């Protein structure tokens, strides 16, 4: 049976034990809390990577837009190249028409040197034209430039074969030369008309392509901005959730520790024993 002195000795032991237990609880908690924190950080990192991976998957939707952008850029470059070459041919056609007028004037004036000079210029201009390839942009009307480059513009009858003239002497007489000039003028007028039509078609295509390209670029930028915002928001939410969890655990321990300390102080504090009690008499 335990007497009053035993109770007092138990009181001292219990107080010491409670204090010791309270002191031991904190480093144990801190150790466990640190382990838990590391576990949560690892889990957070894993979920952040998962969120980023999901965002990358969402970005795969943009692959179609990116491919469309590349295709439109390639198509636009094709149109620009076609329009450039076609424009040079239009300029060439205008120069050829002017040289034909000079050729006609020289023939009328019986000016052989001017005639031959104009004819040389005509042949030189033709050699600098380009046979445009509009198949890749859907414009493949025969403009006659290929035929010009192959057979020339001002031609004479060479034993039944139309051959490119290089001088006034190639013609049997002035009548043949005049007829050749008239035929050349009709031919270059037709070529110029087709070249202008092709230029208008290319301009229309370029405008529509530019509009589509701008819209596609804007869609890509909007999608990237939206994805970045959603990704950042999701990661921030994960971080906030785990921070609240850790704060909650830490706060719960502090409250529990404070209650334990208070209870230990009240239950095992000898000064809390009422005056005049049997325990005070023994003390």
Image (cartoon, rainbow, N blue to C red):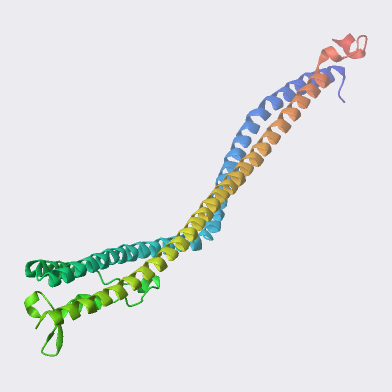
Residue 212: x and y, percent?
A: 49, 60
Residue 259 vs 205, above or below: the answer is above
Left or right: residue 264 compared with residue 78: right
Work out which quarter of the rendered image holds the C terminus and state it: top right
Q: Quadrant of residue 172?
A: bottom left
Give the residue at x 56% y 52%.
50
Q: Nearer the viewer, residue 15 or 66?
A: 66
Q: Residue at x 41, y 63 (%)?
A: 203
The residue at the far front in this view is: 109
Figure check: 101 above or below 277: below
Residue 157 in the image: state x and y as whole percent: 13, 85
Q: Total number of numbered labels?
A: 0
Q: Is residue 24 left or right of residue 216?
A: right
Q: Quadrant of the N terminus?
A: top right
Q: Quarter of the image holding residue 115?
A: bottom left
Residue 7 versus residue 72: which sits nearer the camera?
72
Specify whether residue 93 is in view: yes
Question: Residue 184: x, y in percent?
Answer: 22, 76
Res 173 → quadrant: bottom left
Residue 145 visible, this angle: no
Residue 80, placed above or below residue 264: below
Q: Nearer the viewer, residue 246 or 55?
A: 55
Query: What residue lies at 85% left-to-right and 14% top-to-bottom?
Result: 272
Q: Residue at x 15, y 87 (%)?
A: 161
Q: Is residue 83 above or below residue 169?
A: above
Q: Residue 127, image x and y in percent?
A: 18, 69
């Amino acid at each position: 049976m335990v007497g009053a002195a035993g109770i007092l000795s138990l009181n001292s032991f219990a107080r010491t034990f409670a204090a010791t237990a309270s002191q031991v609880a904190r480093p144990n908690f801190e150790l466990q809390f640190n382990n838990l924190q590391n576990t949560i950080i690892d889990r957070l990192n894993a979920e952040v990577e998962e969120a980023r991976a999901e965002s990358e998957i969402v970005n795969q939707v943009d692959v179609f837009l990116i491919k469309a952008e590349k295709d439109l850029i390639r198509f636009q470059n094709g149109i620009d190249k076609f329009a450039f070459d076609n424009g040079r041919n239009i300029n060439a056609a205008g120069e050829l028409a002017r040289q034909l007028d000079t050729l006609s004037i020289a023939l009328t004036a019986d000016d052989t040197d001017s005639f031959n000079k104009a004819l040389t210029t005509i042949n030189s201009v033709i050699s600098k034209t380009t046979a445009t390839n509009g198949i890749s942009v859907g414009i493949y009307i025969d403009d006659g430039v290929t035929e010009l480059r192959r057979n020339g513009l001002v031609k004479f009858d060479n034993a039944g074969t139309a051959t490119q003239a290089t001088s006034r002497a190639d013609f049997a007489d002035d009548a043949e030369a005049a007829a050749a000039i008239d035929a050349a003028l009709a031919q270059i007028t037709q070529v110029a008309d087709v070249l202008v039509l092709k230029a208008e078609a290319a301009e229309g295509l370029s405008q529509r392509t530019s509009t589509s390209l701008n819209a596609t670029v804007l869609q890509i930028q909007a999608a990237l901005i939206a994805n970045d915002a959603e990704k950042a928001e999701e990661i921030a939410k994960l971080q906030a959730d785990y921070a609240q969890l850790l704060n909650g655990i830490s706060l719960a321990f502090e409250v529990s520790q404070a209650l334990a300390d208070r209870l230990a102080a009240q239950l095992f504090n000898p000064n809390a024993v009422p005056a005049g009690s049997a325990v005070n008499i023994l003390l």
